[in-house]
Amino acid sequence: MRAIVLEQFGPIDNLKEAEVPSPVPSAGEVLIKISAVSVNPIDYKTRQGKGANNWTSFVLPEILGWDLSGTVVALGAEVTEWKVGDEVFGSIGFPGLGRVDAEYAVAQAGHLARKPSAIRHEEAAAASMAGLTAWQALTRLARPERGQRVLVHAASGGVGHMAVQIAKAFGAHVTGTSSAANRDFVLSLGADAHIDYRSVGIEDYPHDFDFVFDPLGGEATFRSLDLVKKGGTVVSILPQHDPRIFAEAAAKGVAFDFVLMQSRSDDMGEVAKLLADGAIRPRIAKTFPLSELGQAHALLETGRTAGKIVLTV
């Protein structure tokens, strides 16, 4: 099969197109003919030797990527929930390896969801890791309730723009932060209010939120503790390396945790329901062919992408 292979950690030039053996599904796995994949910050960070390389053993050359949408073409033993011809999507193998930047990939049967018929493969791939991460972060520690006030940092980003929509689907009042250039986009997602983070310091944000969704990490996480009411919740999707954050959160009466996304078909299925109902829809900022994976990484690394980057296979 055709695949994009990372030969060595480093720049995008280390991603090379190659012909490699097609994978074979083992027990509990399915083989998927891929129609579309999407890229996330974890992809380029891993390519650089960071990201998933911090917790997963990579033996290079290796195929990167986690998000896919496609069609089941073969079943491993003991697979009963899927059949050949099913259209599926998901963010597979995480926090291990997904190996989706190719024509075919094998996935654990329990990492997939059925692709809604009204959703294109490109949209399903775009909603995979971003939607799953947002869902798990918004439900693992505490789910925002109807009428509660939710702040979503980086609301125009891949995960952030999904978090805005999911929080709105829960009935929350949502404030999203972004640059002024993306204000209209954030409001178009259903956000009730917008903050331009470049002109308003985080210390001047409202301090009456019930829930803060934090894809920024670092100092922004500490400062977010001051933005929620006592008894409120702050969830970060980036590792917080300063252990003082937990003590400070406890002292302020704030629930805090870091959520590392896990590939799970039950949670992916919840995202699929929201997609099928039209409650959420990923914005695709740009589409590339798989052969231009390096260009997709480079665009994502600028940090200026509103929505998701997708590749067709």
Image (cartoon, rainbow, N blue to C red):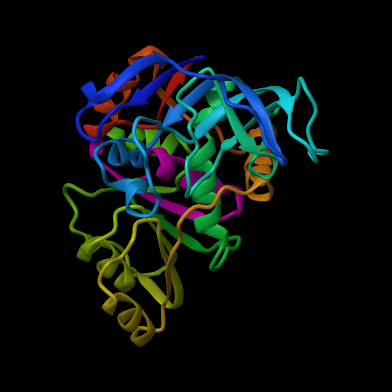
| Residue 159 picture location, percent across and down | 43, 43
Q: Quadrant of residue 271?
A: top right
Viewer-proximal residue among 184 and 153: 153
**Residue reaching furthest to the right:** 80
Residue that appears at 31% across and 18% down: 16
Viewer-proximal residue among 160 and 238: 238
174 in the magenta segment: yes
| Residue 137 picture location, percent across and down | 50, 57
Q: Quadrant of residue 25?
A: top right
Residue 92 as seen in the image, left or right of residue 4: right
Residue 300 as seen in the image, left or right of residue 193: left
Q: Please tell me how many numbered marks the rendered image carries.
A: 0
Residue that appears at 41% across and 32% down: 64
| Residue 299 picture location, percent across and down | 26, 25
The answer, for residue 69, to whether it is visible in the render is yes
| Residue 128 picture location, percent across and down | 54, 37
The answer, for residue 289, to whether it is visible in the render is no
Residue that appears at 49% across and 28% down: 100
**Looking at the picture, does residue 312 appear above or below residue 179?**
above
Viewer-proximal residue among 146 and 3: 3
User: What is the magenta range?
Assistant: 155-181
Viewer-proximal residue among 80 and 42: 80
**Looking at the picture, does residue 107 appear above or below residue 256?**
above
292 in the magenta segment: no
Residue 203 as seen in the image, left or right of residue 252: left
Residue that appears at 55% across and 67% down: 142
